[in-house]
Image (spheres, rainbow, N blue to C red):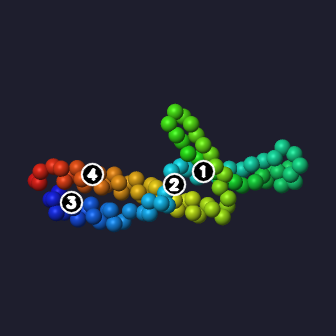
């Protein structure tokens, strides 16, 4: 890749980065909670649908946060922004590697 082409590619990637303030690492899981007694819905076998954000940390530590249903679209958008940002950062790094090599 030529120097000028690499610089243009890098600038295009940088300009398309998602907002850094709206990123979230983790996985969104759908769970069903069932109460042992006293809940008619659970007694019928229905249970209660909940969304859980699961985040894994170093040393095997995992944290889980219940997400209110109205926040699900925002959490999904932030998770997608994180994945997009991570992929674009990798592409920027590869472009920078090309800038370090002499032109072919």
- Closer to the observer: label 2 or label 4? 2
Q: Earlier in the sequence, mark 3 or mark 4?
A: 3
Q: Can residue 44 be seen in this view?
A: no
Q: What element carries label 4?
A: helix
CB-based contact (under 8 Å), mark 1 and mark 2: yes
Residue at x-position 51% and y-position 54%: 24
Q: Earlier in the sequence, mark 3 or mark 2?
A: 3
* CA separation in Å, label 3 and label 4: 10 Å
Relative to residue 33, is residue 1 depicted above or below? below
Q: How crowded is mark 1: few (under 14 residues within 10 Å), some or many (20 or more)?
A: many
Identify the mark at residue 53; answer none if there is no mark: 1
* CA separation in Å, label 1 and label 3: 38 Å
Residue ID for mark 3: 6
Q: Nearer the viewer, residue 100 or 45?
A: 100
* CA separation in Å, label 4 and label 1: 31 Å
Residue 9 image point, x, y percent: 25, 63
Q: Earlier in the sequence, mark 1 or mark 2?
A: 2
Q: Is mark 2 on a helix, strand or loop?
A: loop
* CA separation in Å, label 2 and label 4: 24 Å
Q: Which of marks 4 and 1 is nearer the N terminus?
A: 1
Q: In which quarter of the image is the N terminus?
A: bottom left
Q: Is residue 77 left or right of residue 86?
A: right
């Amino acid at each position: 890749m030529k120097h000028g082409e690499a610089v243009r590619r890098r600038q295009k990637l940088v300009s398309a980065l998602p907002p850094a303030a709206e990123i979230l690492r983790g996985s969104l899981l759908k769970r069903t909670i069932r109460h042992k007694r006293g809940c008619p819905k659970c007694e019928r076998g229905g249970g209660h649908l909940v969304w859980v954000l699961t985040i894994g940390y170093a040393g095997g530590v995992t944290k889980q946060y219940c997400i209110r249903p109205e926040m699900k679209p925002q959490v999904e958008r932030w998770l997608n922004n994180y994945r997009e940002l991570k992929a674009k950062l990798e592409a920027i790094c590869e472009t920078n590697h090309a800038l370090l090599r002499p032109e072919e």
